[in-house]
Image (spheres, rainbow, N blue to C red):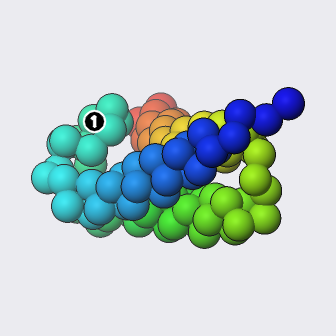
Amino acid sequence: MEIHGSYLLLYGVGIILMIVNIIQSICRPKGKFFNPPQKKRDDKTVFRMRMLYAVSQGILLIGFVICAFNFHNYVVAIIGLTVGNILPIVLVMLYDSYLNMRENKQTEI
């Protein structure tokens, strides 16, 4: 059962949202990009976090566009939109958690 045309709207919204997310990840001032407390991070680490987000978002955007051409399906559009917008955030949070864990181990020694 397919909802005609609405999957195209989801693909369009998803593509626009992912492009805006990439631009924001590059242009937002330090401390205004997601929840990890970037003020305590040096500029090099913040740059790595932003590039991790932008690259993963770009790769998922390419995959989402490929899905838009190959799968004319509402369910695939919803899954692609969800994964495409949440996975880069999860990767940045995992990287921040890794950095916190590494800093805590260094202070214990």
| Residue closest to the eye, 63 or 6 | 6
Residue placed under numbered mark 1 in the picture? 37
The answer to which of 76 and 58 lies nearer the viewer is 76
Q: Position of residue 68 (x, y in %)?
A: 67, 60
As drawn, the residue found furthest toward the right would be: 1
Q: Quadrant of residue 24?
A: bottom left
Residue 95 visible somewhere in the drawing: no
Which residue occupies 32% across, 38% down? 34
Q: Quadrant of residue 48?
A: bottom left
Horizontally, is 65 left or right of 58 in the view? right
Pointer 1: residues within 10 angstroms few (<14), some, or many (20+)?
few
**Which quadrant would the N terminus be assigned to in this image?**
top right
User: Farthest residue in the left direction?
Assistant: 29
Residue 92 in percent (x, y) is at 48, 46
Position in image of residue 28 (x %, y %): 19, 53
Q: Amino acid at mark 1?
A: Pro
Q: How many marks?
A: 1
Residue 66, position as x, y percentages in the image: 69, 68
- Residue at figure coordinates x 51%, y 66% from the top left: 58
Q: Residue at x 71, y 66 (%)?
A: 69
- Is residue 51 in view from this perspective? yes
Q: Secondary structure at mark 1?
A: loop
Q: Is residue 94 above or below residue 18?
A: above
Q: Name above or below for residue 79 compared with residue 29.
A: above
- 62 vs 109, left or right, is right
